[in-house]
Amino acid sequence: MAVISQTIGLLGYLAVWRHFHPEQPIPLASAVTNGAVLAASLALSAPAVILLLVWIVRMTRVPVADYLALKRPHWRDIVLGVVALAIVMAAASGIATALGKESPSFITDTFTSAAAEGMLPLLLVSFVILGPLQEELIFRGFLLPGIAQAIGTWPAILVTAGIWAISHGQYEWFFIGEIFAMGVLFGWIRCRSGSTIVPFILHVMVNGTAVVAAATGTV
């Protein structure tokens, strides 16, 4: 659902750009790392996906806030999530260093191209807020509890983490594995806290840290 809408948004932005800038077409191959294109496509697609998700949930006649676990979390769960996230990211960084893995250029390329076209504010909103909100509502808010009812909590956590990781196909397999580990953490803290807001906060922290690193040249 999210992939389809983002693809439509991306193609729509490229079409509009080609109409107003026929002398400067953006090749489709380079669009996946073009910060302006990604920011615009996500800004268009995320609200549409979230509204569609809300519509689907409303058909179940269960209150949206209850179905998606949009309740105020306890501060202890937030602290626990932040500590666990720091451990996961530190472990991933250590393994990457040991294996000689350099940080993916995708984030730096996206940040640089968005800044060059004056689209950095929109990229920040899209990448740090809209992206995490959309993904957490889909994976930890909607899919996780539904799958858990069928196969159990931990299998559901692993399945949703796997699907979420594979959806980040712009990264090489090592970093997809890192995303999978974060997905397991997000699923676990969602189930422990009973709130989708906690993994959303952690997701925002991850993406925000990536943007800061790109801005300071530390990736």
Image (cartoon, rainbow, N blue to C red):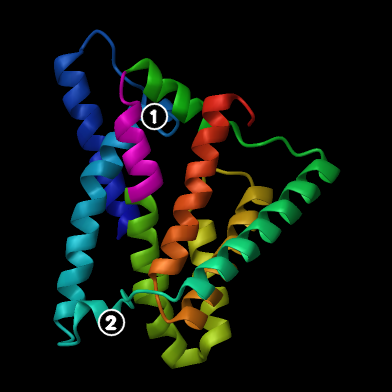
Q: Front-most of 153 and 74? A: 74
- Residue in the image at 75% along x and 55% along y: 91
Q: Earlier in the sequence, mark 1 or mark 2?
A: 1
Q: Is residue 106 visible?
A: no
Q: What distance separates the C-alpha of mark 1 from that of mark 2?
A: 33 Å
Instruction: Look at mark 1 in the image and give the residue it sits on.
Output: 35
Query: Magenta span covers which residues?
Result: 118-129
**Quick check: can you spot residue 209?**
yes
Report which quarter residue 172 is drawn in.
Answer: top right
Secondary element under disc 1, as helix, strand or loop, is helix
Asked if residue 97 is positioned above or below residue 192 in the image, the reply reads above
**Residue 162 percent across, percent down from the top left:** 55, 66
Mark carried by residue 197? none
Quadrant holding the C terminus: top right
Disc 2 crowd, CA 10 A, few/some/many (<14, 14-19, 20+):
some
Q: Is residue 18 left or right of residue 215?
A: left
* Mark 1: few/some/many CA within 10 Å (<14, 14-19, 20+): many
Q: Position of residue 158 (x, y in %)?
A: 57, 75
Q: Residue at x 18, y 64 (%)?
A: 52
Taking the view exactly as shown, the residue that stands out farthest to the front is: 75
User: Identity of the amino acid at label 2?
Assistant: Tyr
Check disc 1 and give the amino acid type: Gly
Secondary structure under tag 2 reads helix
Provide the major secondary structure of the magenta segment: helix
What's the mark number on residue 67? 2
